[in-house]
Image (cartoon, rainbow, N blue to C red):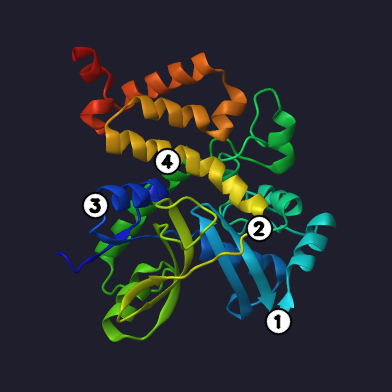
């Protein structure tokens, strides 16, 4: 299907987008996430504003993109966010998961000047400042639920089972918009009616401050001509510097695939900001070996410990 567009939702989405672009450049693809639109919902809720009235521009890498512009009817909303956080009025309690306050992102805003797109509990995993052994005070101060991901998986599976049973018993099923971009992309490409989404693509000069080929997330026009990612060349240096700490890990993971060298998996773990802040080199090597063994046949043959021993 040479004219098909691959809508890529699978995690690790940024690494997948980069790897597909490197190994199969002929594939038309876009990596998709819901971080941007969910964050707009969160900010509108905290500021008591209709989300449809908020104007914004976001760019960066997936899970580490930032709101470069955030306005309501031409008024900059950042002063309101800073004041509300400083006075303890925001973030408000999470409407969907009370155990996940949004404090980490607001703290990062005060340090970097811009609001990041990824949820607080997830973003804390990408940086070395919030999750530290022997520092339960940080976990408590920023309200980081350490077991959030497995708990959410268990809850989602149970919810899906309940939902499936309800659908089987229902006489009719009402379909409501999810907020995901896939349907917007399909509609715009088929009808020609333009829409703007936030898509992830191999960097082809779209963000000149970041390495060529890495997966970047930028505003993207969609119409009958397909997906047309924009160029964003004014990202502040503190933001691109932080992005590069995670791009290093992504680059080495893609290198492991492209070169079929498992050593680069160890290098990726070594360069991870959170891992490097907590573990010494022997611990990183041992942890990576254990993880490779635990994943077994899920891995390509070159990365399987048993296969490498046999060779």
Badges 3 and 4: C-beta atoms under 8 Å apart? no
> Any mark on residue 24, and which?
3
* Side of 303 relative to 76 (left or right): left
Q: Disc 1 or disc 2, which is closer to the eye?
A: 2
* Side of 72 relative to 259 (left or right): right
Report whether residue 174 is seen: no
**234 or 280, which lies in front?**
234
N-terminal-most mark, 3 or 4: 3
Report whether residue 273 is seen: yes
Q: Picture coordinates of residue 165 (x, y %)?
A: 29, 57
- Identify the residue position indicated by label 1 in the image: 74
- Identify the residue position indicated by label 2 in the image: 236
Q: Secondary structure at mark 2?
A: loop
Task: Report crowding for label 3: few under 14, some 14 to 19, many 20 or more residues within 10 A (C-alpha).
Answer: few
N-terminal-most mark, 2 or 3: 3
N-terminal-most mark, 1 or 3: 3
Q: CA distance from mark 4 to mark 2?
A: 22 Å
Q: Secondary structure at mark 4?
A: helix
N-terminal-most mark, 1 or 4: 1
Residue in the picture at 40% in, 68% down: 181
Q: CA distance from mark 2 to mark 3?
A: 32 Å
Badges 4 and 2: C-beta atoms under 8 Å apart? no
Q: Secondary structure at mark 3?
A: loop
């Amino acid at each position: 299907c040479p004219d098909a567009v691959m809508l890529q939702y699978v995690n690790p989405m940024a690494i997948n987008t980069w790897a597909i672009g490197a190994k199969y450049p002929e594939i038309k693809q876009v990596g998709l996430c819901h971080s941007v639109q969910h964050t707009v919902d969160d900010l509108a809720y905290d500021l008591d504003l209709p989300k449809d009235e908020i104007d914004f521009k976001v760019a960066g890498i997936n899970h580490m993109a930032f709101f470069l512009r955030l306005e309501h009817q031409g008024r900059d909303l950042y002063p309101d966010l800073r004041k509300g956080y400083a006075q303890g009025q925001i973030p408000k309690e999470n409407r969907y998961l009370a155990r996940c306050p949004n404090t980490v992102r607001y703290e990062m805003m005060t340090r970097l000047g811009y609001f990041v797109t990824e949820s607080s509990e997830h973003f804390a995993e990408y940086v070395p400042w919030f999750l530290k052994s022997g520092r339960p005070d940080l976990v408590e101060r920023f309200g980081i639920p350490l077991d959030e991901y497995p708990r959410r998986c268990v809850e989602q599976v149970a919810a899906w089972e309940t939902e499936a049973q309800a659908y089987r018993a229902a006489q009719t099923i009402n379909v409501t918009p999810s907020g995901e971009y896939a349907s917007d992309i399909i509609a715009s490409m088929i009808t020609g009616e333009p829409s703007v989404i936030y898509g992830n693509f191999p960097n082809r000069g779209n963000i000149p401050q970041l390495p060529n080929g890495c997966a970047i997330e930028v505003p993207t026009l969609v119409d009958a001509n397909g997906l047309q990612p924009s160029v964003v060349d004014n990202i502040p240096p503190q933001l691109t510097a932080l992005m590069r700490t995670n791009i290093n890990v992504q680059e080495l993971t893609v290198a492991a695939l492209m070169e079929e060298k498992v050593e680069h998996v160890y290098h990726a773990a070594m360069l991870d900001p959170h891992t490097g802040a907590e573990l010494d080199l022997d611990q990183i090597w041992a942890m990576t070996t254990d993880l490779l063994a635990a994943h077994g046949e899920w891995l390509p043959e070159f990365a399987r410990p048993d296969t490498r021993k046999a060779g």
